[in-house]
């Protein structure tokens, strides 16, 4: 017969793994935003979107207005995702948003790589060349985001089933 102590430690593992996963993913998003806003030894709150926009534009996917809009919004969206992931706020929705964002990044990066575009990735600043390692790194981040999202749904479902 299973003791209550043993069953409670088993049920703590999924929550612990979810906590670790969401904190790691949140920190990754915060670092990505930081590298877009702080480079060359200074903060670039007034012109970060120009430099980041050049990286976005090099993918040849969006018109100028789309590049400028993403250049202005994306670093702050990454900050919000990072903070919400670490805090555990609206985790299912934030997990979905992070997964979709990473899926879009990987799609654009894969397209650029297949077309042979020799560009800077833009993921963590403008000094990283797009290649197989950046694709593998971002794909592993997508796997983590999907795991966090699925974990958030499963734990919520278990909690709802137990409480009813």
Image (cartoon, grey):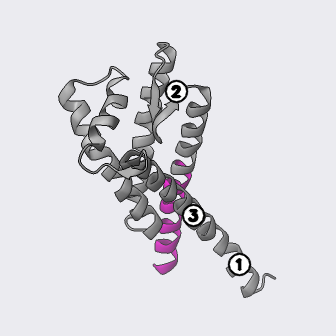
Furthest toward the right, the residue is 1
Q: Which residue is mark 2?
A: 130
Is the magenta region chiefly helix, strand or loop? helix
- Vertical order, 10 against 110 (above or below): below
Which image quadrant: the C terminus?
Answer: bottom left
Label 2 environment density (alpha carbons within 10 Å; few <14, some 14–19, many ≥20): many
The quarter of the picture where residue 54 lies is: top left
Q: Nearer the viewer, residue 64 or 145?
A: 64
- Vertical order, 25 against 125 (above or below): below
The residue at 49%/24% (across/down) is 110
Q: Which circle marks residue 18 in the picture?
A: 3
The quarter of the picture where residue 13 lies is: bottom right
| Marks 2 and 3, how far apart at CA | 30 Å
42 lies left or right of 69: right
162 lies left or right of 10: left
Q: Position of residue 27 (x, y in %)?
A: 50, 58
| Marks 1 and 2, how far apart at CA | 43 Å
SS type, badge 1: helix
| Marks 3 and 1, how far apart at CA | 15 Å
The residue at 32%/45% (across/down) is 74
The residue at 49%/34% (across/down) is 127
SS type, badge 2: loop
Furthest toward the left, the residue is 65
**Sooner in the amino-acid sequence: mark 1 or mark 2:** 1
**Sooner in the amino-acid sequence: mark 3 or mark 1:** 1
User: What's drawn in magenta, residue-wise?
Assistant: 146-164
Residues at circles 1 and 2 in contact by the CB criterion of under 8 Å = no
Q: Position of residue 143 (x, y in %)?
A: 57, 45
């Amino acid at each position: 017969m299973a003791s209550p102590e043993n069953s409670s430690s088993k049920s703590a593992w999924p929550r612990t793994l979810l906590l670790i996963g969401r904190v790691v993913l949140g920190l990754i998003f915060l670092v990505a935003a930081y590298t877009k806003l702080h480079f060359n030894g200074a903060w670039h709150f007034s012109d970060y979107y120009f430099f980041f926009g050049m990286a976005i534009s090099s993918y040849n996917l969006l018109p100028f207005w789309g590049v400028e809009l993403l250049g202005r919004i994306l670093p702050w969206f990454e900050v919000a995702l990072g903070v919400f992931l670490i805090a555990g706020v609206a985790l299912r929705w934030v997990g979905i948003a992070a997964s979709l964002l990473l899926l879009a990044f990987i799609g654009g990066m894969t397209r650029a790589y297949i077309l042979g575009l020799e560009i800077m990735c833009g993921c963590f600043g403008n000094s990283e060349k797009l290649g197989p390692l950046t694709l593998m790194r971002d794909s592993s981040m997508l796997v983590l985001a999907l795991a966090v999202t699925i974990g958030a749904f499963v734990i919520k479902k278990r909690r709802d089933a137990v409480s009813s």
